[in-house]
Amino acid sequence: MLLAQISAKKMEESIVEILSIGGQTGPTLLGTLQSKEPGISKETFYRVLRKLLKEEVLNKHATIYELNRYWLQKIYRFSKKHIEINQNSDIHNILSFQEGDKLNYTFKNPNLMGIYWAHTYDMIFEQHDPKIPILIFHPHEWLIHTRIESESFFLNRFQDDKKLCLFSIGGNTNLDKVFQKDWQNPHLRINTGISYNLKDREYINVLGDFIFKVTVSRKFSNDLDKFFTTYKEISDQNLDKLKKICTRNDKTKMTLIRSKKNADQWRTKFKKDFYIPK
């Protein structure tokens, strides 16, 4: 019985994680779970779904299962309280970095990296001097498609908080240009087709003296580039393919370092491609 309870609990967590990306039909959701855990039975799966519906963790609209917004609000309030209690300690630990101090992280897939990066980034963003532009380099901006709500919140904050962000995209595909067209504004300036001699596996984010460097696997980089080169727009069918690329097991590394020297070098590079008001 204990093993069954553990299995059901694990399945609940997997369902919530999958639906955090977007709603799915029952058969599609079951297929996604079975691709990770082949032993999952249809009967057990739907029993767990009924339990999550009863507990108001999920909603069902027509044939689509999705996370319940009221449940998300409760989680948000709990998380907000937790953040407020622990934020001072977290901020102190990170902002007390000395020149050259760094931390290394390893994640089993790029999507999990995005979740943890957002948590750490947010603490530094809150303290960031708005007079200093924030710098971002991505080979392609895939997060806006696979983590729509969280990435939209992240991108909108530049305008909301009146902090300038210079966002360079290595690719120059139609999807890269659509992102530029849809999201560019006075506080979020976007250029495409810029590499800064970085490898197509590398991502950079600079806030003040703090530098996030992310390195993805060669397979992830190749498959992502192939996706952006092949498709000119996002559809339900190819979006599912992109989500699978971003959530499969592909080791992803992230380094957080405090280095004024390196940060200044990045600002000099970005000034060649962006107008920065004094």
Image (tube, rainbow, N blue to C red):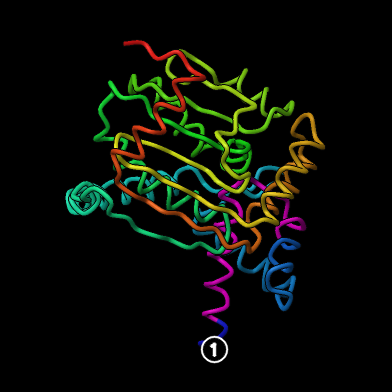
Quarter-wise, where is residue 50 in the image? bottom right
- Is 171 situated above or below 18? above
Q: Main secondary structure of the magenta part?
A: helix
The residue segment tinted magenta is 5-29
Q: Is residue 144 magenta?
A: no
Residue picked out by circle 1: 1
Is disc 1 placed on a helix, strand or loop?
Answer: loop
Q: Position of residue 140 (x, y in %)?
A: 63, 37
Instruction: Look at the image and tell me in which quarter the N terminus lies.
Output: bottom right
Quarter-wise, where is residue 182 in the image? top right
Quarter-wise, where is residue 53 in the image? bottom right
Q: Is residue 28 magenta?
A: yes
Q: Position of residue 213 (x, y in %)?
A: 45, 47
Q: Name which residue lies at 21% across and 54% down.
A: 93
Dot 1 amino acid type = Met
- Is 104 situated above or below 185? below
Q: Position of residue 19 (x, y in %)?
A: 60, 51
Instruction: Look at the image and tell me in which quarter the C terminus lies.
Output: top left
